[in-house]
Image (cartoon, rainbow, N blue to C red):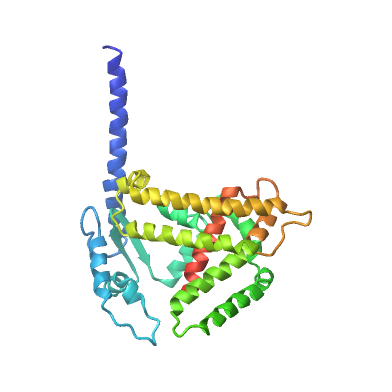
Amino acid sequence: MGQLLPIAGAVAAVLISWLWSFLFAFAVRPYLRVKRLREQGVRGPINGSFWAGNMEEIQRMKMEAQDMVLDINSHDHLARISPHLVRWASLYGRVFMYCVGRKPWLFVGEPELVKQVLSNKFGFYRKIEVGAGLTALLGKGLVLTEGEAWVRHRRVVSPAFTMDKIKTMTRTMAECAQSMIENWREKEEVEVGVEFHELTADVISHTAFGSSYAAGKEVFSTQKELQKIILASFAKSDLPITKSLLQYLPTEKNKRRWGLEKKLRETMVSVIEKRMASRSESGYDGQDLLGLMMEACMNGEEGKTQLSMDEIIDECKTFFFAGHETTSIC
């Protein structure tokens, strides 16, 4: 019995320490951040509910914005997509704060302040933790890495995006566009938004994977399914238990997400392994993104510019998803 008391005391101390850390991170730290921002003159809406912050108000304004009729001659669509930002900026100025769950968010609309954040030369502004879902979708590429890892990734990836390299891909882009136009001639009606999504997927698949563009199309469809699952839960309150526990439980949604992640990785690994097996003395064939990136990996100094298989996959995920979503909308 005497031996159990020290063990019980140690367990109790660990539990108390964990409970205090949890309470501090969940309740005390957000309160202190909000207090510090208000002391510096940063205004914003009241914090809303304890659990959801301003999320209920944001969702209500977004539902009301769905009834808006936009001017087809105007590109001012922010009031429809993010009405809360437009409203709060008119009330509190170009710099204000609001809460998503228990976490305070700072909106910065002053150009000079935005420039300081984006330059970030001294590492003052860290990248946000996006969670397992978005990491699976975007990959731990340039968008999410920091420090030495970011420098190493950039050394490998940036040579593939020089103007000379991009020019070599213009013929492929033109051929994809010509194929789309020929297809339009056979249709009476064309849904332009859908067609441009398909065109962008076709172009990126060819320019990223070259002769393996069919696998690239499969990557796109898989990422699209992943995106729907992730966005469905994105607007929910970011409670710590949601971030640290629920995303790892074997729910139907999580099992579907894990299956898609596995399929995505296996498709990319298959393409990369085939490319590695076909490497000649002169290097990797083709001027697609994957070949250029793998060539940079092989030519770099050991430990400085080389990327692992998983890191190459992550960069491909970033290029596929980010490139597709931005280009197809533009």
Q: Residue furthest top?
A: 2
The N terminus - image quarter? top left
Q: Residue furthest left?
A: 49
Q: Could you tell me residue 205's position as x and y percent?
A: 57, 65
Q: Residue at x 50, y 62 (%)?
A: 220
Q: Could you tell me residue 29's position as x and y percent?
A: 31, 48
Q: Residue at x 67, y 68 (%)?
A: 165
Q: Is residue 91 visible?
A: yes
Q: Nearer the viewer, residue 201 or 328?
A: 201
Q: Please determine whether, in this image, residue 170 is positioned above or below residue 267.
A: below
Q: Is residue 129 visible?
A: no
Q: Please determine whether, in this image, residue 266 is positioned above or below residue 330.
A: above
Q: How many marks?
A: 0
Q: Residue furthest bottom?
A: 73
Q: Residue at x 23, y 68 (%)?
A: 60
Q: Could you tell me residue 262's position as x and y percent?
A: 49, 49
Q: Nearer the viewer, residue 77 or 182?
A: 182
Q: Could you tell me residue 54's position as x and y percent?
A: 25, 61
Side of 15 where 73 appears, left or right: right
Side of 2 where 199 appears, left or right: right
Side of 84 where 130 appears, left or right: right
Q: Quadrant of residue 76?
A: bottom left
Q: Residue at x 67, y 59 (%)?
A: 291
Q: Please determine whether, in this image, residue 204 is positioned above or below residue 190.
A: above
Q: Nearer the viewer, residue 328 or 9?
A: 328
Q: Residue furthest front?
A: 186
